[in-house]
Amino acid sequence: MTDATNLLDLAALDAWMATHAPGYSGPLTATKFETGQSNPTFRLDAPSGAYVLRRKPPGELLKSAHAVDREYRVMKALAPTNVPVPPVLSLCEDEGVLGAVFFVMGFIPGRNFEDPALPGLAPAERTEIYDQMNAALAALHKVEPSSVGLSDFGRPGNYYERQFGRWRRQYEAARDEDDPAMDRLIGWLDREMIADDGRVSIVHGDYRLDNLIYASDRPELLAVLDWELSTLGHPFNDIAYQCMQLRMPTGVDARGLEGVDRAAQGIPTEAEYVAAYCARMGVAEIAHFDFLLAFNFFRMAAILEGVKRRALDGNASNPEKALRLGALAPTYVRKGLEAAEIA
């Protein structure tokens, strides 16, 4: 983390916290997490405890992106459910305070795993970590949106058609050069678009290991983070998204499991992981999984084009990392074509 004294108006934030964060007492200090490419994220420390602040980035932003207000709303709504989320304290929509919309939540101490291979852990602990991750995802998808006040959190029906259109537009707005491979993937998804089957749930939109916090001394999942892309949608997209990510190469940026002997490491195979999820959801199988995988590879490539665009425009939270991540977009496109079996 880096000192954030010059990135936040601490005096203005201290005054806001005093009236909007129950139990708060200052003064406070701030450090910036190196993670949080989309929305800059800061740790706040004060005599009353530790907090986390998420804010929109500066500069001109793509429409509907960086929705920290939606992150706040969904985590607050899920607090009484079986889905582990951090305690959210308050949302500030007055841009006059810090220059952007932001929210503050409680800091959850624990472990955050960036490498899905979980090096240094025993196989049994790896197995439990993946099982906890699987169980939390199923728990999320079993929450009835109307029961937590989220019946209007998105438009139900035609999820893939709407999401495809959205990310196609975002990609076109962010791309800086032609990519025939991406055009080919887009064309396949357009032709093979699957029909809506009526399933609707709250979806996370970026469900993966490095967006989770586990207890420091045991494989217990304490909190699911980074809800920026959450909406009402098709539950099976979250599980396909996670499998998509794990099909990527290993490494700091790709964070996949390609080539890893999962059985030897105590990590479930893709088939085992999907089967466990299906058992928890009470379904026999997930149809059109090739389409779901290809769609998620496309969507992630589109997101990374946006990350690269912010770096080129000078709006990225971490420009160097943003350019590295943006360079992965062609790999996601290639993997999408492989999932569609048209590579």
Image (cartoon, rainbow, N blue to C red):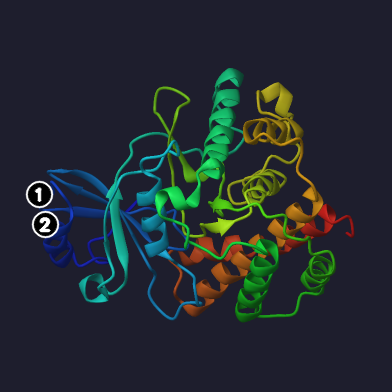
Quadrant of the drawing holding the C terminus: bottom right
Badge 2 marks a residue whose secondary structure is helix
Q: In this image, 204 relative to 273: left or right?
A: left
Judge left or right: residue 8 versus residue 78.
left
Please tell me how crowded label 1 is: few (under 14), some (14-19), or many (20+) other residues with Cα within 10 Å. Answer: some
Give me the residue at 60% from left, 53% from top: 200
Q: Which mark is residue 18?
A: 2
Instruction: Tell me which corner region of the image, top left, top right, bottom left or bottom right, holds residue 266.
Output: top right
- Looking at the picture, how far across and down is residue 292, in whole percent? 74, 54
The x, y position of residue 56, in whole percent, is 38, 68
- Identified by mark 2, the residue type is Ala
The reply to whether the C-beta atoms of the residues labelled 2 and 1 are less than 8 Å apart is yes
Element at badge 1?
loop
Q: At which x and y percent is residue 304?
A: 60, 65
Q: CA distance from mark 2 to mark 1?
A: 7 Å
Residue ranking furthest to the right:
342
Tell me what residue is drawn at x 81 percent, y 74 percent: 180
Residue in the image at 54% along x and 26% along y = 120
Q: Amino acid at mark 1?
A: Ser
Between 258 and 154, the residue placed more toward the observer is: 154
Sequence-first disc among 2 and 1? 2
For disc 1, the marked residue is 25
Q: Residue 117 or 159: which is nearer the viewer?
A: 159
Vertical relation: 285 (above or below) 8: above
Quarter of the image for residue 175 reads: bottom right
